[in-house]
Image (tube, grey):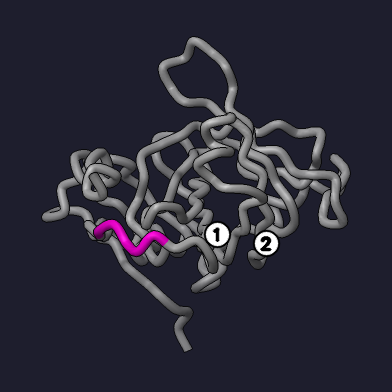
Amino acid sequence: MSRDLLKKYIEKRDFGITGEPKGKVGKRAKTNLRFVIQLHEATRIHYDFRLEWHGVMKSWAITKGPSYDPADKRLAVRTEDHPMDYNDFEGVIPDKQYGAGPVMIWDKGAWMPEDDPDKMEKEGRITFTIEGSRMKGQWHLIRMRTPDKRENWLLIKSKDDFALNKTKNADFLKRENTSIVTGRTMDEIRKAGLGKTTKLTKAPN
C-alpha cells in the first residue's frame, strides 16, 4: 500500500530520460514535517505546493501562486503524491516528458497541522502553520465541492500578523522570484539545464 502512494508519480515519468528522483515512500513522521514550494514553468506557469505526510509529499498546483491577502482564494488543484527526495529537485525536466520545463525551489521549511491531517483532509479543511523563508503564519486548504473531475481546493491565508493587504501583496510574487536554495532566476535555471536536469541540495559556495 505504501508503494501505491507513488504509483501515479512513477507511471507519469521515464526515469531513463528525466533527472527527477524516482524516490520511495519515506518514514511516516508526525513531527518536524517538511514543506516545499516549487515554481514550475510547464505548459502553464504554476507553483507546486507540497506537504509531507505518510512518507510522501502531498501536492497541489497553484496557478497564481500563494497570496498573503486573506481576501484571496487561490485555486489549488490536487496532483499526484511526490517522493520526499523531490524537495531537493531544481533543474529542467526534458522536452516531451511529463511537466517539461524548468523547476525552481521557491521556498521550503516546516509545517505544523492544527489537527490530525487525515481527519482534516476527510473533512475538507486543512488548517496549518508554515515556517518557511517566504511562507509564514497560518493557512487553510479548503476542498471545493464541484462536479470537476479534478480535486479542487482553495489556499487561503489566515488573518494573522503575517497577512498583507491587496496593495502590499500585489508585488510579493514579483519581488520574490529567485530560488531559495541557489539564488537563481528561472532564466538561469533554464539556461543551465541545457535540456538536462540538475539536482541541487545546497547553494553553491
Residue 30 visible in this rendered orientation of the protein: yes
Local crowd size for mark 2, using a 10 Å CA cut-off: few (<14), some (14–19), many (≥20): some
Q: Where is residue 33 in the image (x, y as percent from the top left)?
A: 52, 63
Residue 95 visible in this rendered orientation of the protein: no
Q: Position of residue 54 (x, y in %)?
A: 39, 52
> Nearest the camera: 37 or 126?
126
* Residue located at (70% from left, 46% from top): 139
Residue reaching furthest bottom? 205
| Residue 53 circle label | none
Write the start and end of the magenta stretch as one range.
Answer: 24-28
Residue 150, picture quadrant: top left
Is 27 one of the magenta-colored residues? yes
Q: Which amino acid does label 1 sit on?
A: Trp
| Residue 134 circle label | 2
* Residue located at (36% from left, 39% from top): 80
Disc 1/disc 2 C-alpha distance (Å): 8 Å
Q: What quarter of the picture does the N terminus occupy?
A: top left
Relative vertical location of residue 159 with respect to residue 63 in this rendering, above or below: below
Q: Which amino acid does label 2 sit on?
A: Arg
